[in-house]
Amino acid sequence: MQHRLLLPLLALALCACNTYQPLRDDKILYPSPRRAPDGPGVKVMYFGNTTILISDGETTLLVDGFFSRPNPLSVKFGKIEPNEKVIQKQLDLAKMGRVDALLIGHSHYDHALDAPLVAQKLDAIAAQQGKHTVTMGSSSYAFIHEGGGATCDREHLHIVERDGMTRTFGKFTVTFRPSEHISPHLPGQADMMGHVQALVVPPAKAKDFKCDPVYVLHIRHADEGSIAITTTAGALKDQFKGLTADVVMPAVGLLSKEPCCQQEFYWREAVEKLNPKTVIPVHWDNFLLKLDDSPQVRRNLKAPPLKFFDDTRSTMDFVKRHSKDKDVWTMGLRDSFLLRSGKVLLAKQDM
Ligand SMILES: [Zn+2]
């Protein structure tokens, strides 16, 4: 009797598991680790979730700077804090030098947890050159920044206004526009909606990192082209009005759990209206797993384990269906590409 039950149970377990891994999907054109070629252009490097380093060699921007990835038990039942060793390791491996601006799209912990400590580390590097690292984030993020011990004066922290903000760093023009978080009805979201209203001093509960207000990011380089980034799969109508982008990096986490009309709306507002040539979905990986740097595991970012939480295959099928006239990629840990005159370039061995 027990044996007879075993097979159906096994089949059920397999159905519930995410056996699909985007980095092994060759229909998403992912033949090997991707590296930017040398030479002029804007180099873009990925660290999972929506942590993205963008540099033209003179000026450097970092989105989020989330590396610690605390374990699920601490996130759900305990308290979380930045892991300095993990952060330093990633900064070193990426050979991160001076960063002019740290950009936080919204203040959930999987974007903002490490930012105050990362800002302090980067600012110490910038100070050696007589410069500052400016952090741009929401009014909610300001409580996290201060609670994390980072400097909050006007040279270090620019609180993004409610209806958005534009700042120039070297040849980059960075625009924050108001947006919306993916729906609160989804697993684990309800507790984390709303505004932060008091200092968040680590270690703190994950649900103290509330998300509003949320912004999309548009980053234009005067010579090389534009990149748009969303840090959650929610959207507002016309959030990118008047803007285009050569590359869009849309967050797709939990998109599979939204109703079809919401998925279509998100795609229209986060991708289609920008008319990009290249789409690189981000925030699909399981950020409860540590970043894996072992040399054997080059394709190191993994989808969440259960379809109940997020059906990554269904999301990537949606992305492919909606991007037939575009290049679609995914990127692994510290993969990079070069944006030169609106074109995306890879080192020859990675083409
Ligand atoms: Zn979020």
Image: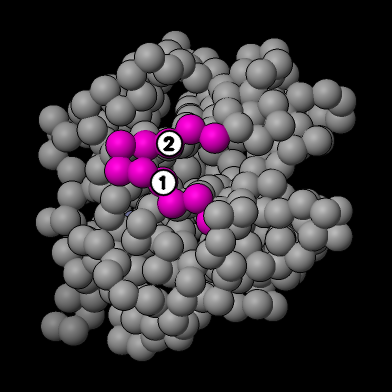
Question: Quarter for ligand 1?
Answer: bottom left
Which comes sooner in the sequence, label 2 or label 1? Answer: 1
Quarter of the rendering occupied by the C terminus: top right
Q: Nearer the viewer, residue 302 or 226?
A: 226
Location of residue 169 in the rendering, given as x and y in whole percent from the top left corner? 65, 35
Mark 2 closeness class: few <14, some 14–19, many ≥20 residues within 10 Å: some
Residue 67 in view (yes/no) = no
Q: Secondary structure at mark 1?
A: loop
Is 297 magenta? The answer is: no
Q: Residues within 10 Å of mark 1 (few under 14, many from 20)?
A: many
Circle 1 sits on which residue?
160
Q: Nearer the viewer, residue 152 or 4?
A: 152
**Quadrant of residue 116 in the image?**
bottom right
Q: Are marks 2 and 1 in contact (CB under 8 Å)?
A: yes
Q: What residue type is disc 2 on?
A: Met
Instruction: Identify the disc placed on residue 29.
Output: none
Helix, strand or loop at mark 2: strand
Instruction: Report x, y in % for residue 218.
Output: 48, 30
Amino acid beneath label 1: Val
Question: Is 185 on the left or on the right of 74, as rendered?
Answer: left
Q: Residue at x 71, y 42 (%)?
A: 60
Observer-nearest residue: 215 or 259? 215
Q: Is residue 108 above or below residue 40?
A: below
Is 314 on the left or on the right of 57, as rendered?
A: left
| CA–CA distance in space, label 2 to label 1 | 6 Å
The magenta segment is 157-167
Residue at 71%, 32% in the rendered image? 170
Residue 127, visible in the rendered structure:
yes
Kindly identify which residue carries mark 2. Answer: 165
As for residue 159 lying within the magenta part, the answer is yes
